[in-house]
Image (tube, rainbow, N blue to C red):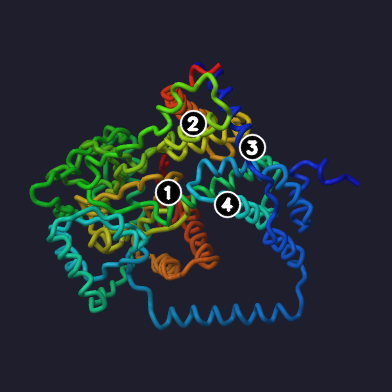
């Protein structure tokens, strides 16, 4: 008898369909952390763990719809996470009805970099947590949600454009465009903090 | 910083993030769900009668609601502005209005400062709420199916570049009473730049034009730009058009014959909003007169893409020579439905109808779809 730990995700989903508790434990162990990291950077919520649980509940509810021939479990899982994030962003309304005049001249001032000064002199001895904080802040400054999502997912999923294409339901080239564009902005932001000189 | 260096930093960052996350274990709710999954296949004698009874009661209630209150024209979701077309046309003059589709509370929050007279107009609206008169019922007009097909044939001729449009039987095309721009404001419809419309198409709403062509156009205006791009819904979409946050968009249409026109928008969350007929956005009602140009929403208003939203949006333009009462009925039910599975079912029913009719070339109902992505 194969133990769950040795099973593929797709095999575990089969057990999940049957309601086996061990299947949920195994999937949590494999994917909960990466989901948490992804959601903590794309959602503006105090506790991303709630979202992680919501997504796993969705996985259980929809386990019968999962088709391993169409996509890997991880792609499917992140697709659900992605939809969850989109639903939160949307806040009920997509389209507003507005007079044209109100749209013209609207400016977004943007936020200043709060870490820039303090980090500038510390690049040589920067520890991981400071680096993490700087990256997090630079990612947070990305104005387009899709770019932020794409960049975080790119690194969380191990630079797999094909998988991301399945998650976003967009072509590989489109996804790459988002990642490259977001990467450039984050790179500039990090350099402004003096992190480019890091050895 | 080169790409390799940047990748290295980002990899270190992800590793750090993963390390700093504590162990996450399934909550009791997850196990409960799994238990429910186990139990689901067991159908007992007790559960079935209860389910059947509940379904019966629900069906009876739905029938009761339909009988007691036949579907009337309604705007999308809440914050409806009911009234006759004439009243609304009056109100539209001088009104510089922004409305949120679907949510009254947010509508108030997100609304920029407006001129005093606009506020007064809104107050009048609120004051008159509840005592507005119902719209007169429309007379059903049975027209031969052939009439509905004429436009399709004409369209083919137009695509081939020939100006051989058959003049509609009602040859005396009535003078177009276009949606009038307010005094002092630009008539933006006349400045339309059609990037992808066939050269044979008429340039902007032509004056004294005798032959009226079928025209359905999606127009958009990038944020902060004065220029307007137009996309012909009949042209094949080589790639899905993209709109960015806060870009404006609207729809323009006209038909050589009298038509019943229904425009539905399916948002990225699959929420459906009927954009036309909808007195919230345009006072015009079905049937649409031959040759009349309609722009929804009525100029100078625009729909615009809300900030931070993205995904695919579909716009279905349904036209018919006869009123589509069954579509009206489904939409009315969908509109009234509070949510949950029932609403999802009704939405799925509407979407099926769109797709089925779109694929049936011979159908007396014409369905055109336009899709765009929001980034």
Which quarter of the picture shows residue B170? bottom left
Q: Nearer the viewer, residue B48 or B103?
A: B103
Residue B314 is marked as 1
Q: CA distance from mark 3 to mark 4?
A: 17 Å
Depth check, mark 2 against mark 4: the one in front is: 2
Judged left or right of residue A83, residue B68 is left
Q: Which chain does tag 4 point to?
A: A
What residue is pinned by disc 2?
A: A134
Local packing at callout 1 (Cα closer than 10 Å; few below 14, some 14-19, many 20+) is some
Residue A51 is marked as 4
**Upstream in the sequence, badge 2 or badge 4?**
4
The image shows residue A164 at horizontal and vertical percentages of: 58, 35
Secondary element at tag 3: helix
What residue is pinned by disc 3?
A: B18
Query: Could you tell me if the residues under marks 3 and 4 are in contact, i.e. CB atoms within 8 Å?
Result: no
| Residue occupying the point 30% across, 67% down | B80
Secondary element at tag 1: strand
Q: CA distance from mark 2 to mark 3?
A: 16 Å
The lab-note entry on whether marks 2 and 3 share a chain reads no
The image shows residue A108 at horizontal and vertical percentages of: 30, 39
The lab-note entry on whether marks 3 and 4 share a chain reads no
Q: CA distance from mark 4 to mark 1?
A: 28 Å
Can the viewer see residue A40? yes
| Residue occupying the point 27% across, 58% down | B281
């Amino acid at each position: 008898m194969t133990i769950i730990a040795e099973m593929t995700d797709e095999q575990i989903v089969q057990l999940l369909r049957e309601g086996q508790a061990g299947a949920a434990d195994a999937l949590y162990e494999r994917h909960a952390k990466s989901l948490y990291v992804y959601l903590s950077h794309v959602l503006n919520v105090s506790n991303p763990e709630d979202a992680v649980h919501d997504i796993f509940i969705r996985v259980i509810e929809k386990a019968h719809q999962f088709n391993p021939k169409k996509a890997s479990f991880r792609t499917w899982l992140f697709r659900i996470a992605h939809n969850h994030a989109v639903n939160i962003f949307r806040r009920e309304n997509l389209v507003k009805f507005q007079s044209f005049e109100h749209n013209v001249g609207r400016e977004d001032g943007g936020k200043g970099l709060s870490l820039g000064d303090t980090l500038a002199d510390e690049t040589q001895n920067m520890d991981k947590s400071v680096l993490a904080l700087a990256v997090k802040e630079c990612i947070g400054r990305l104005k387009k949600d899709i770019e932020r999502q794409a960049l975080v997912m790119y690194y969380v999923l191990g630079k797999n454009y094909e998988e991301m294409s399945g998650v976003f339901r967009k072509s590989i080239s489109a996804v790459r465009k988002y990642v490259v564009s977001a990467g450039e902005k984050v790179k500039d932001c990090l350099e402004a903090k003096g992190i480019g000189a890091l050895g | 910083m080169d790409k390799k260096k940047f990748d290295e930093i980002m990899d270190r960052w992800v590793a750090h993030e993963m390390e700093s996350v504590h162990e996450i274990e399934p909550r009791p709710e997850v196990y409960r769900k799994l238990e429910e999954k186990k139990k689901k296949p067991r159908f007992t004698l007790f559960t079935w009668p209860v389910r059947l009874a509940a379904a019966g009661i629900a069906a009876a209630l739905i029938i009761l609601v339909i009988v007691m209150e036949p579907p009337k024209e309604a705007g999308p979701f809440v914050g409806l502005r009911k009234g006759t077309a004439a009243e609304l046309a009056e109100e539209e003059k001088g009104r510089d209005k922004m409305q949120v589709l679907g949510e009254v509370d947010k509508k108030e929050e997100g609304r920029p400062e407006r001129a005093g007279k606009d506020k007064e107009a809104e107050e009048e609206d609120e004051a008159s709420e509840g005592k507005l008169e119902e719209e007169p019922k429309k007379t059903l007009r049975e027209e031969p199916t052939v009439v509905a097909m004429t436009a399709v044939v004409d369209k083919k001729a137009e695509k081939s570049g020939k100006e051989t449009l058959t003049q509609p039987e009602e040859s005396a095309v009535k003078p177009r009473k276009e949606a009038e721009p307010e005094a002092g404001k630009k008539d933006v419809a006349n400045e339309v730049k059609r990037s992808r419309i066939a050269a044979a198409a008429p340039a902007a709403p032509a004056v004294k034009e005798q032959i009226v062509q079928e025209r359905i156009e999606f127009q958009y205006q990038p944020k902060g730009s004065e220029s307007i791009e137009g996309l012909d819904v009949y042209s094949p979409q080589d790639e899905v058009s993209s709109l960015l946050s806060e870009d404006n968009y609207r729809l323009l249409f006209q038909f050589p014959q009298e038509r019943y026109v229904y425009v539905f928008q399916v948002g990225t969350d699959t929420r459906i909003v009927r954009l036309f007929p909808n007195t919230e956005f345009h006072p015009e009602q079905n049937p649409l007169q031959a040759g009349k140009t309609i722009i929804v929403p009525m100029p100078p208003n625009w729909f615009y893409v809300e900030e931070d939203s993205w995904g695919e949006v579909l716009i279905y333009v349904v036209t018919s020579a006869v009123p589509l009462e069954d579509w009206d009925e489904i939409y009315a039910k969908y509109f009234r439905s509070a949510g949950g599975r029932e609403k999802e079912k009704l939405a799925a029913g509407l979407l099926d109808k769109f797709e089925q009719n779109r694929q049936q070339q011979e159908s007396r109902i014409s369905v055109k779809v336009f899709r765009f992505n929001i980034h």
